[in-house]
Amino acid sequence: MPHNEIALEPSKKRRPLKVVLSGYEDLPEDQRPAFEFKRLSFRKFRDVASIYDGLAANKSAGEALTKIAGALKPNLLSWSNVVNIDTGDAEPFNPEKLEDVVDMGEGKELLKALMTGGVTEEARKN
């Protein structure tokens, strides 16, 4: 194999990216809402980054939120300790329900974490 190629053995697959939402520090660690995402290829990262960069240019908040959800859902693998905001009931994993379990700020936090490999502003402070 040429020196500039990288190959991962099947047993060395990349681990999912786990993102724990900030704002839940008062809960025990095993009860905090957490989301697992696929690791992004360079190509997918570029697509997600263009959505993030274009958020300010959206003409409406609804349009921006639709784009955030559209970037997150296909990359979402699982979640834990997540409840439906409207009902307060535990929400089983279903990517199509993402907009029922996070608010606008949390959606933006998840998008940013997906782009930065999970390193959130909160983690940078510590």
Image (spheres, rainbow, N blue to C red):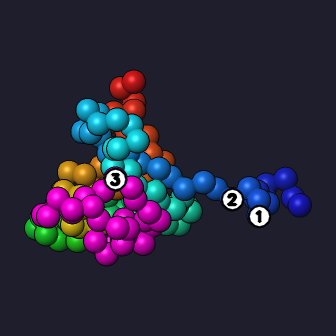
Q: Amino acid at mark 3?
A: Asn
x%, y% of residue 30? 40, 42
Q: N-terminal of the two: label 1 or label 3?
A: 1
Q: Which residue is mark 3?
A: 81
Q: Amino acid at mark 2?
A: Lys
Mark sitting on residue 10: 1
Can residue 113 be seen from the camera position used here?
A: no
User: Per the image, is 82 magenta?
Assistant: yes
- Magenta range: 68-97
Q: Residues within 10 Å of mark 1 (few under 14, many from 20)?
A: few
x%, y% of residue 8? 76, 59
* 79 or 123, nearer to the observer: 79
* 60 or 22, nearer to the observer: 22
**Looking at the image, which residue is at 30% across and 56% down?**
82
x%, y% of residue 98? 29, 67
Furthest toward the bottom, the residue is: 96
- The mark lying in front, picked from 1 and 3, is 3
Q: N-terminal of the two: label 2 or label 3?
A: 2
Label 2: which secondary element: loop
Q: Which residue is mark 2?
A: 13
Relative to 84, say whether 33 is above or below: above
Can residue 44 be seen from the camera position used here?
A: yes
Q: CA distance from mark 1 to mark 3?
A: 30 Å
Q: Are marks 2 and 1 in contact (CB under 8 Å)?
A: yes
Q: Quadrant of the C terminus?
A: top left
Relative to 74, say whether 3 is above or below: above
Q: CA distance from mark 2 to mark 3?
A: 25 Å
Q: Quadrant of the N terminus?
A: bottom right
